[in-house]
Every structure is written in structure tokens, then in C-alpha cells.
Image (cartoon, helix red, strand yellow):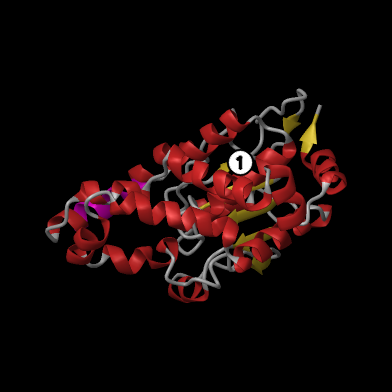
């Protein structure tokens, strides 16, 4: 099992799998460190091939967790990895019109993008989507299963993803790091790395959108991440459950004992 990452959040540069990185290396409040090579996040695996596929297989991944909707999976199915278990957890099953799941369709319609995302509406749409990551019953059930699976050592190393690996995946990564004891400011730093690691690979999307008469600046709030988005999910969890600890325990089935077990499994001194 190997990981090319050299520092927390370092990208694993695969052209056919952008936004791939390990959660390893982040330091917890009590001085422990998230283990390297056990948790990875990425975009979907629909295009990975060639040397990139060999590099991915070299990470020793045993489980891939797909957080996408059924239509997303049908449109861009993951490449099957030999010997790797595929787990499907549809975060947005209760709201398939949510922004992340509708992104591909939306980008094909510049006029609709102008109407839907102009005048600051993009930020409002994404904020609503991030509230749903906490509020939707399907999201709660999906993330609850995700953490239950992480507690099973034989499942790891684990790679989890959605479509672009930023929203549903970003919340999975953020809640994992918070449970492990990583300070919130570092969790935010990890989350924002997507802007550096994903957006350059999407330049053809911006170019094509512009060629069809669209304003590429309209896409940036949709295709990137912002502090306010993650803060919206955190605020929703605190509002709905009282505090993050109660969200973890009641919403995600991760009480203090289970969180301690997760820390024992996924962090080192």
C-alpha cells in the first residue's frame, strides 16, 4: 500500500482522476496524526485508465464508496477495480433535483445557467445543497453507513467519491476529520484544496461554456468550493442537533465510544 502524498492534502496527480488526495497527515488537537494511505477522496472513477489506473491500484484500495445518485452512476459508471468492493450510498436519494446531481445537465444549457445562477443565485443554490447534506434523511442514512463501514478494518484502505469530489465528498471528508479530532480550521483548509486540485482540470468546461455564449464566471461558485458552503453544513448540523457532537452521535450513529474507536483505527501518535 503506497501513497505519493508528501504532506497533508498533497494531490496525487492523475490526469484521469483529478482531485484525488489522501486524508493522511493532518494533525489532531491532541497531537496524533491521521494515518497515511487509508482514506482517499476523488472525483468519480469513470475515466481512470492506463498508467493512472495502475497508480490507483497501487494505493491498495479495498473499498470504493460511491456517493452519487443512480442517474449519475448510470451516466458515468465507475471503472471496475479488480478485487475492490464497490459500495453505493446515495446521499441525495431524497432530492434528486439537488444542485450537485443536476450539475452536468445544467452546464449543457448556458441560457439556463444565466437564469438559474445569475445575480448571486449560484451561492444560494449551493448553500441549500449543503444544508441538505445534513437535513435529508437519505444523506443521514448514507453517511451513517459510511462511518459504520470505516469502523471495519478489513474495509480499508477506502476511497470515497461523488461526481467532482467536492460537495458530498467534501462533507464526508470534513466530518471524518472532525471526528478524528482535527481542528476545524485545518478541516476547512483541506476542504478548500479542491479549488487548486479540481478547477484546473475543468478548464475545458469553462472554455466550452464560453464558446456557447455563457459567462464562465457564473460557473466558478458552482464548480469550486467556498468557506461559506462548508460553514452552511456545519451551521445546519449545530442548528438541527444542538452541536456537532450530537449530530455525530444521533444523526450519524457515532457516539463517543465509536468516535474513539475510529480515532484508534485511523490515527497514530
State which region is magenta.
201-208
Residue at figure coordinates x 46%, y 58% from the top left: 129
Residue 268 appears in the figure: yes
Q: Residues within 10 Å of mark 1 (few under 14, many from 20)?
A: many
**Quadrant including the C terminus:** top right
Q: Does residue 174 lie above or below 81 as drawn?
A: above
Residue 37 appears in the figure: no
User: Splitting the image into 4 quarters, where does residue 26 fall?
Assistant: top right
Q: Nearer the viewer, residue 97 or 168?
A: 97
Q: For residue 205: magenta?
A: yes
Q: Position of residue 43 (x, y in %)?
A: 49, 55
Please indicate whether residue 228 sits to the left or right of residue 236 in the image.
Answer: left
Residue at figure coordinates x 60%, y 43% from the top left: 174
Prevailing SS of the magenta stretch: helix
**Quadrant including the N terminus:** top right
Q: Does residue 184 lie above or below 111 as drawn?
A: above
Q: Position of residue 173 (x, y in %)?
A: 61, 46
Q: Does residue 127 lie above or below 108 as drawn?
A: above
Q: Position of residue 75 (x, y in %)?
A: 43, 74
Residue at figure coordinates x 40%, y 53% from the top left: 126
Write down the residue under mark 1: 22
Residue at figure coordinates x 53%, y 35% from the top left: 188
Secondary element at tag 1: strand
Please indicate whether residue 167 sits to the left or right of residue 23 in the image.
Answer: left
Amino acid at each position: 500500500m503506497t501513497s505519493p502524498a508528501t504532506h497533508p492534502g498533497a494531490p496525487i496527480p492523475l490526469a484521469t482522476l483529478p482531485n484525488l488526495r489522501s486524508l493522511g497527515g493532518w494533525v489532531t488537537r491532541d497531537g496524533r496524526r491521521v494515518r497515511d494511505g487509508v482514506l482517499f477522496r476523488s472525483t468519480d472513477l469513470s475515466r481512470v485508465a492506463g498508467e493512472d489506473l495502475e497508480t490507483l491500484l497501487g494505493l491498495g484500495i479495498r473499498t470504493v464508496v460511491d456517493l452519487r445518485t443512480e442517474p449519475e452512476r448510470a451516466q458515468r459508471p465507475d471503472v471496475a477495480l479488480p478485487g475492490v468492493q464497490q459500495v453505493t450510498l446515495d446521499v441525495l436519494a431524497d432530492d434528486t433535483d439537488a444542485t450537485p446531481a443536476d450539475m452536468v445537465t445544467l452546464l449543457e444549457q448556458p441560457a439556463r445557467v444565466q437564469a438559474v445562477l445569475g445575480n448571486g443565485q449560484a451561492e444560494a443554490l449551493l448553500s441549500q445543497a449543503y444544508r441538505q447534506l445534513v437535513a435529508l434523511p437519505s444523506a443521514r442514512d448514507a453517511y451513517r453507513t459510511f462511518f459504520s463501514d470505516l469502523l471495519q478494518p478489513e474495509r480499508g484502505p477506502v476511497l470515497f467519491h461523488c461526481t467532482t469530489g467536492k460537495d458530498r465528498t467534501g462533507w464526508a471528508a470534513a466530518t471524518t476529520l472532525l471526528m478524528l479530532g482535527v481542528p476545524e480550521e485545518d478541516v476547512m483548509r483541506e476542504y478548500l484544496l479542491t479549488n487548486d486540485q479540481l478547477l484546473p482540470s475543468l478548464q475545458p468546461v469553462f472554455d466550452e461554456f464560453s464558446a456557447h455564449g455563457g459567462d464562465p464566471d457564473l460557473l466558478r461558485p458552482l464548480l469550486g468550493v467556498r468557506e461559506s458552503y462548508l460553514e452552511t453544513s456545519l451551521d445546519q448540523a449545530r442548528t438541527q442537533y444542538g452541536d456537532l457532537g450530537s449530530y455525530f452521535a444521533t444523526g450519524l450513529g457515532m457516539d463517543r465510544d465509536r468516535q474513539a474507536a475510529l480515532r484508534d483505527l485511523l490515527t497514530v501518535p
